[in-house]
Image (tube, helix red, strand yellow):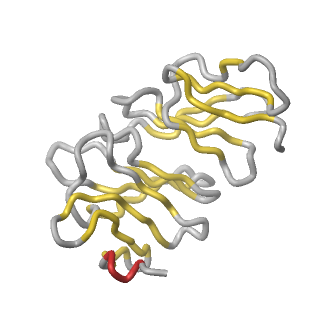
């Protein structure tokens, strides 16, 4: 709506009026990083850097709900959301980077298989889900292939980073 800006201060989500004034704390149990829904109604966030939980907060009334407790610990930036889904690197007992997709309407979780490539060191992994829910861009640590990989949903496949040129 242009009336506020949201930011993270000391791992809490804050809201400040764009016209100036004192910021107010939005979350009471952390919030890092934050993502805003395309329609501006929801704020999505992980509780803290080693949290396995991703939450969302409705801006109009402060209602909060946990969407998952399956985020890989330490991979706080390894998730992305659009109007349809939340995709994230899920917890696991081995070194693979398993992707899960949570449908935001039905609440159903779908296993998408493993990320094509190794995760970079903790704290550096990032995902970006396309608005149409068909592609996912992932930061990976693979020598010789580039650091950014495009993964298409149908079928989810790896695309060489050289093909990402505009």
Horizontal arrangement in the rendering, residue 99 relative to residue 87 (left or right)? left
Q: How many marks?
A: 0
| Residue at 47%, 34% in the rendered image | 46
- Residue 161, quarter of picture: bottom left
Name, please, the residue furthest toward the front: 20
Q: Position of residue 39 (x, y in %)?
A: 75, 52
| Residue at 54%, 53% in the rendered image | 81
Q: Position of residue 143 (x, y in %)?
A: 16, 65
Q: Nearer the viewer, residue 18 or 91?
A: 18
Q: Nearer the viewer, residue 32 or 87?
A: 32
Q: Nearer the viewer, residue 155 or 138?
A: 138
| Residue at 59%, 16% in the rendered image | 28
The image shows residue 165, relative to residue 98, as above or below, that is: below
Q: Nearer the viewer, residue 143 or 158?
A: 143
Horizontal arrangement in the rendering, residue 115 relative to residue 37 (left or right)? left
Q: Position of residue 118 (x, y in %)?
A: 20, 57
- Residue 85, quarter of picture: bottom right
Horizontal arrangement in the rendering, residue 13 relative to residue 126 (left or right)? right
The image shows residue 27, relative to residue 65, as above or below, that is: above
| Residue at 74%, 34% in the rendered image | 59
Q: Position of residue 111 (x, y in %)?
A: 35, 59
- Residue 1, quarter of picture: top right
The image shows residue 94, relative to residue 141, as above or below, that is: above
């Amino acid at each position: 709506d242009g009336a506020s800006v949201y930011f993270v201060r000391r791992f809490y989500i804050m809201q400040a009026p764009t016209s100036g004034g004192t910021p107010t704390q939005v979350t009471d149990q952390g919030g890092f990083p934050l993502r805003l829904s395309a329609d501006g109604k929801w704020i999505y966030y992980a509780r803290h850097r080693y949290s396995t939980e991703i939450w969302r907060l409705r801006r109009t009334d402060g209602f909060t709900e946990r969407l998952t407790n399956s985020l890989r610990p330490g991979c706080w930036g390894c998730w992305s959301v659009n109007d349809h889904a939340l995709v994230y690197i899920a917890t696991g007992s081995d070194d693979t980077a398993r992707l899960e997709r949570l449908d935001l309407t039905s609440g159903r979780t779908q296993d998408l298989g493993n990320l094509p490539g190794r995760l970079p060191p903790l704290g550096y992994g990032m995902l970006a889900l396309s608005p149409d829910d068909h592609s996912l861009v992932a930061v990976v640590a693979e020598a010789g292939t580039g650091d950014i990989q495009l993964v298409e949903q149908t079928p989810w496949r790896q695309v060489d980073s050289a093909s990402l040129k505009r």
